[in-house]
Amino acid sequence: MHLASQEVPLVWYLLLSAVLFCLGIVGFLIKRNLITVFMSIELMLNAVNLSFVTFAHQWHEVKGQIFVFFVMVVAAAEAAVGLAIIIAVFRARATLAVDRIDLMKL
Amino acid sequence: MNGPLLYLPLIPLVPFVGFLLNGSLGRRLPKTLVSGIALIAPLISFLIVVRDWVLISTPKEMRAWNGPGPIPKLYPLPLTESLPWTWITAGSLHIDFTFVLDQLSLVMLLVITGVGFLIHIYSVGYMHSDEGYWRYFAYLNLFLFFMTTLVLAGNALLMFVGWEGVGLASYLLIGFWFQKKSAADAGKKAFIVNRIGDFGFLIGLFLLLANFGTLSFSELAQKIASNPAMTGGVLTAIALCLFVGATGKSAQLPLYVWLPDAMEGPTPVSALIHAATMVTAGVYMVARTHFIFDRSPLALSVVAIIGAVTALFAATIGLVQTDIKRVLAYSTVSQLGYMFLGCGVAAYSAAIFHLMTHAFFKALLFLAAGSVIHAMGGEQDMRKMGGLRTKTPITFWTMTMAVLAISGFPLMSAFFSKDAILAAAFASGSLGKLLWFVGLVTAGLTAFYMFRLWYLTFFGETRSHDAHPHESPWSMLGPLVILAILSVGGGWIGAGRFGSLLSPVLGTKTEEMSGSLEVVMMFLAVAAGFVGWFIAHRMYHQRSATAQLAAPAPAGYNLLQNKYYVDEFYGLIIVKPLSYLSKYFFEWVVEYAILGGLAWLLAGIAALSGAILQRWQSGNIRSYAAWLALGAAVLLYFVLAPHVFGAPSLPFGMAGH
């Protein structure tokens, strides 16, 4: 612990991660633009990544860092697919307002 | 396994192969090939049985057996052969496909495969123009498969398989002409009535299993023999349950009603299944399990009384029937009653002896009746027959032999076997003397109705004008002649030595009758037969009228003509209520209330929950997102709560770690 005390404390990283995650959730819930919602999801993923890296550093455990790579790969794939879907939706409906994309309603 | 190789499993399996071949390919095969397969199968079985018979009797003593000398010394029977795999293993219970050859099953096998083969030959002639030719022979071979399995079975369960199987074959063959409603109904009736009896048999098996833990006959006999104090009680229950099964299969009161209707089947079937072999399975079963019956005087009395009453009851109905096959059917019921009377007085060997002679002469009677029906172009009503003596001489003479045999004429087969049963009945106490008298009266009635049939069929003038009687082909007459020889001489095979032949299996009767008493009884039995003949001669030959019995007592005649209204009675108290119950109770309660109600209830639940859950499916992405976030929050709460608040318990054991 004496080594950690000379650096930025662990809690700060985690707090930053939590704040980013909550921002992501709030954006996910309240924003109406599909692209903003999508960016909020990316933000949450990165918040999680941050806490992974933090713990990996704290416990000298490389697994956490590897996990981050996986999450980044998934996020990249998701970005590719998600943006393609968004473009397709915009072409079809000429809007990106999530409240109007409600065709799945019964 | 201590004897020669007997090929016992082949005895049932060869007819089964015949059944498979004819049943699957018969429709496409030429008729000669079908008959070839169908005839070779029982012939092979018969030859195996004969070979085994010769093998287990040493040649020197075989010679002694032909004369009136001592009983042949056989191999140490029973000999056992099994199929090489286990059938059932459950805990301590092991059941194999065991086939047992002893004196009892040997006699039965000779009768079944021998008479069966003759009837197969006869059928080739009788059924030659039927379009279901291949189907008929497939069923017939199937029957032989099950019947030989029944007889060879070394344990009660394998016997039960054969027992059910012959019931199936009987059902298929009674309803052979299923386009005719009466035949289809008769098949169903036979099957259902037999099912009632089989229920009793099955309960008996369960009781055996519960009390002795085995179904093997030899082990059961050992266990009972090693426990001489065991009488009555559970053994009575077992014996009575088994006897219920026997009354179903062997057409005794109160379950005999299916047998007369079973005459809807082809006549050779009536001869083979409903006279010579299958219906005697009940007698065989009682003899096979005699060690149980021996320990229960009550059960034995029940068997004897049911047997005697059935004998008399069926004989009286037989007096007035006009359908030639129905007379023979009631006669069969009556003769089976004799056999059970024999079993009931513990004279099992006499019962089996009568079973054998009955197989000969009753098969002959049915086959001859079939020949008569064939000659009359399908007519079965005796009132329309008559005068066939000159037109069908061979049928007439063979039928005469059978009539003499069944009526117990001196030195004919039933003379010996029926006499043995009556003598044993007389020797067994005061109840036995009453039953002996019933048997004696029945003997007189038997002679009467058989000679009535004989006179009505063969004497006088032909009373039908559109019939052109002609003798049957030799494929039908040949078996008649062989069976006639057996009917006449069959008694000599067993007279005096049948009891000691079967004694290793069935035990020995200790009571010996004095010679003079035996002669008196023999005389009485023969006299009863002659009285029956004399009355029949007076009524049906000298006056040559058809309904002579009706004149003096019309009420009694009607009662008999309508078979004591037993069918109507059963219809009223069992069939009608059951069908009403099915129709109304089950239609309303089960169909509407239970099934319909259940369907409505399930549909209602689905619709209601759908209407509620529909609210969640708003189609709005942000509401989905909110639910998602809420769910994640709840999960997070449950994971973290124990660490944060130290909560002791949470659902699903999530907090365990």
Image: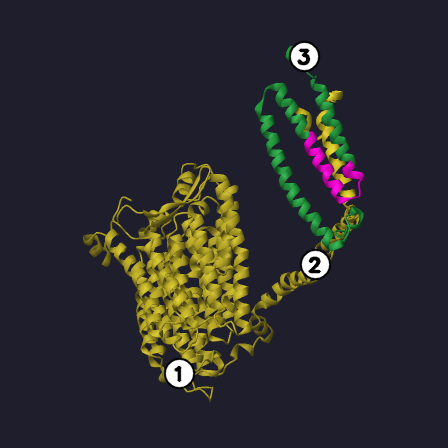
Query: The residue under label 1 is which amino acid type?
Result: Leu
- Figure check: B195 above or below B233: below
Say which of marks 1 and 2 sits in front: 2
Per the model, the C-alpha gap separating discs 3 and 2 is 82 Å
Residues shaded magenta: A27-47
Vertical arrangement, residue B346 with respect to residue B475, above or below: above
Chain letter for the residue marked with disc 3 in the picture: A
What residue is shown with label 2?
Answer: B591
C-alpha gap between disc 1 and disc 3 = 130 Å
The residue pinned by badge 1 equals: B388
Give the prevailing secondary structure in the magenta stretch: helix
Chain assigned green:
A
Residue B481 lies, in percent from the top left, at: 31, 73
Q: Which mark is residue A6?
A: 3
Disc 1 or 2, which lies upstream in sequence?
1
The reply to whether callout 1 and callout 3 are in contact (CB within 8 Å) is: no
